[in-house]
Amino acid sequence: PDLFRMLPDGTRLFVPKGGSLWGALMPETGPHRGIQEPWCYSPSYFAPAHYRLFRDFAAQRWAPGFDTFLPAALGGPRTSLRDLLHAFDGAVTAGYNLLYRSSCASGAVANWVGTRAPCDDPEAQSCPGVPWATTPYVGLKGNCSASGTPFGAYGADASRTPWRVAMDYFLYSRESKELVMYDRSGHKDGSIDFSARAYLNRIARQYRRRAQCDGGTHPEECLFNEKVKTELLASAFDPADPSDGLVCEGVPNIGESWWAPFMAYPTFSAFVAPLEGLSRDESRAWIDLFASICSFPTEGGGKPDGTLCSRSYFDSAQELVSTMVMAGAV
C-alpha cells in the first residue's frame, strides 16, 4: 500500500511491478529496493479490465472480517477496503497515461519503458511524482529491459497490449472512455484524447490504411483458394517499412515481425471497438476474416490448418485469448 506516487491534485498512482521484487516504482536503494533494473515497466502487463473486475468484486462482496487480510502500511496503520479500491483505480489511471507515452499512432507498443520518479529520500516508497515524466526513457535517455526483449521496441512482451485493452473496452466501455489524462508534469490535460477505444482504433485504422486488401467491404480480395492470403494483411505492420509507423517517440526502436502469430493475433481484437467510418457489418467482416485464418478439424484432433497457425505455447495462447475477445467470450 506504500508504493505509489502522488500527483498535484492528490491522485495516488500505482504502477504494477513486473514481479514481486522488481520494476515500476521500486526504490533503487535501501531494504525495499528491487532485484532487477529499477524503474522498468512493461505496458503490456497493464490489465485495466482485470483491475476493475477485482475492484467491483471487492466492493460488492466485502465483509468486515476481510480487513485482516489487507496489508498494513510500513508505518503500522491498517489499510481499508477504501484504500484497496483507490489502488485499483490508481493503477488504471497510471496505466493509460503510461500507455499513451509508450505507443505509436499505428498501435505499436514498447516492450519496456521507464517509469523513473525518484523520491527525495532514495529509500522512500511513496512521494509526489509523475511516473511518465520521461517515458519511454528511464530519465532523460536511459533504457531498461527485464527480459530477453529489447527496450522501446514492439515485440513479444508488448504484444499482449491490444487484447488487454480490448477486454477493458468490451467489459467497461463507459469507464474506459472516461479517462483522466495528465501532462508530463502531472496536471490534468483535457487536450489529450485517449481511451481504450482511441487506442484500439489506431490499430483498426492501420489495417484499413496499410493492408493490401479491404477486409471490411471486399473480404474476398483477401482470399486465395478460399484461404486468407495473410501477406496482404502483414503489410500493415511491417517493421522494415518506416512508413508503417511502428517506430515513434513512444516506441523508439524497431520491433518484431507481424508474421509471428503472437504478434498478429492480438491486433485482430482491436475491431471489437467501433471505428468512425466503419460500419458494424464491416467490423464484423474484418473479425470474420481474421478468425478464418486458421481452420480447425472437427474430428480426430488434427492440427489447425492455415497460413498463420501455431501450436506452440505462447503463440497458441495469444491466438486463443485474442479469438475469445473477438467472439465476446470473456
Image (tube, rainbow, N blue to C red):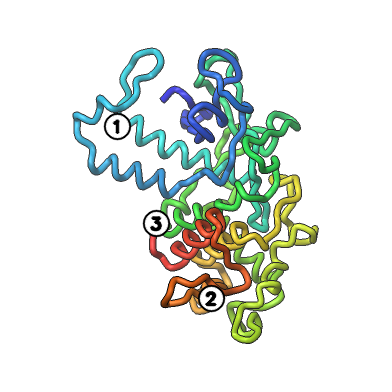
Q: Residue at x 69, y 45 (%)?
A: 250
- Badge 1: few (under 14), some or many (20 or more) residues near its Cα, within 10 Å? some
Q: Earlier in the sequence, mark 2 or mark 3?
A: 3
**Residue 306 is at least partly visible in this image:** yes
Q: Residue at x 28, y 40 (%)?
A: 59
Instruction: Name the amino acid, label 2.
Output: Ser
**Residue 198 is at least partly visible in this image:** no
Measure the alpha-carbon separation of dots 1 and 3: 23 Å
Please provide percent x and percent y for residue 105.
Answer: 67, 56
In this picture, is 90 found above or below 107? Answer: above
Instruction: Name the amino acid, label 3.
Output: Leu
Q: Residue at x 47, y 42 (%)?
A: 92
Q: Secondary structure at mark 1?
A: helix
Instruction: Name the amino acid, label 1.
Output: Leu
* Screen quadrant of the N terminus: top left
Q: Earlier in the sequence, mark 1 or mark 3?
A: 1
The residue nearer to you, when weighing 283 against 301, is: 301
Dot label at residue 305: none
- Badge 2: few (under 14), some or many (20 or more) residues near its Cα, within 10 Å? few
Please provide percent x and percent y for residue 83.
Answer: 35, 30
Q: Which residue is mark 2?
A: 292
Q: Which residue is mark 1?
A: 81
Q: Nearer the viewer, mark 2 or mark 3?
A: 2
Dot label at residue 171: 3
Q: Nearer the viewer, mark 2 or mark 1?
A: 2
Does the CB distance between marks 2 and 3 fall below 8 Å?
Answer: no
Q: Residue at x 42, y 77 (%)?
A: 298
In this picture, is 61 found above or below 287? Answer: above
- Badge 3: few (under 14), some or many (20 or more) residues near its Cα, within 10 Å? some
